[in-house]
Image: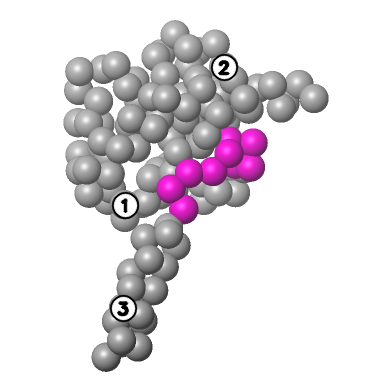
Amino acid sequence: MKFLSVIVVFLGLNTCYGQIKSKPITEFSQKDIKDGILIDVRTPKEFNMGHLENAVNINWFDLGFQKHFDTMPKDRKLYLYCKKGGRSAKAQKLLDSLGYRNTINLEGGYDHWKAKEKL
């Protein structure tokens, strides 16, 4: 019986930790979005000053933020980023609570990606 309990706990932990919930933005590539959507949650002004290729701008501060996701399949990968990582982490938490289970926060945000690009 203890053996069975250990297996159940292991499988449960493996399921929880097996899903990637974040990754450094510097490790992101356009190949990643072949099965997902890249979402920039910054303001339109920030977005227009520069953004990652193929990103869709959905402003975190927009009162109808979550309505933009009503038509998106809940099993689709959503790659989220903002300026430094705070808004995208909040957006990820909200979307997870709405049933989107494949949200990935791109840590470090656009500023980190831009700094790497200059190297």
Q: Residues within 10 Å of mark 2 (few under 14, many from 20)?
A: few
Residue located beneath label 2 in the image: 50
Q: Position of residue 15 (x, y in %)?
A: 37, 66
Residue located beneath label 3 in the image: 8
Residue located beneath label 1 in the image: 101
Residue in the picture at 56% in, 24% down? 110
Q: Position of residue 114 (x, y in %)?
A: 65, 22
Q: Callout 1, which amino acid?
A: Arg
Q: Earlier in the sequence, mark 3 or mark 1?
A: 3
Residue in the picture at 40% in, 30% down? 88
Q: Callout 3, which amino acid?
A: Val
Answer with left or right where residue 110 lies relative to residue 94: right
> The C terminus lies in which quarter of the figure?
top right
- Give the magenta-colored segment's residue range: 20-28
Tell me the element at label 3. Answer: helix
- Looking at the rendered structure, the number of numbered marks drawn on it comes to 3
- Whether 118 is drawn above or below 56: the answer is above
The answer to the question of whether label 2 and label 3 lie on touching residues, with beta carbons closer than 8 A, is no
Residue in the picture at 43% in, 59% down? 17
Answer with left or right where residue 14 lies relative to residue 116: left
Is residue 56 at all visible to an observer of this figure?
no
The answer to the question of whether label 1 and label 2 lie on touching residues, with beta carbons closer than 8 A, is no
- Whether 41 is drawn above or below 16: the answer is above
Q: Quadrant of residue 13?
A: bottom left
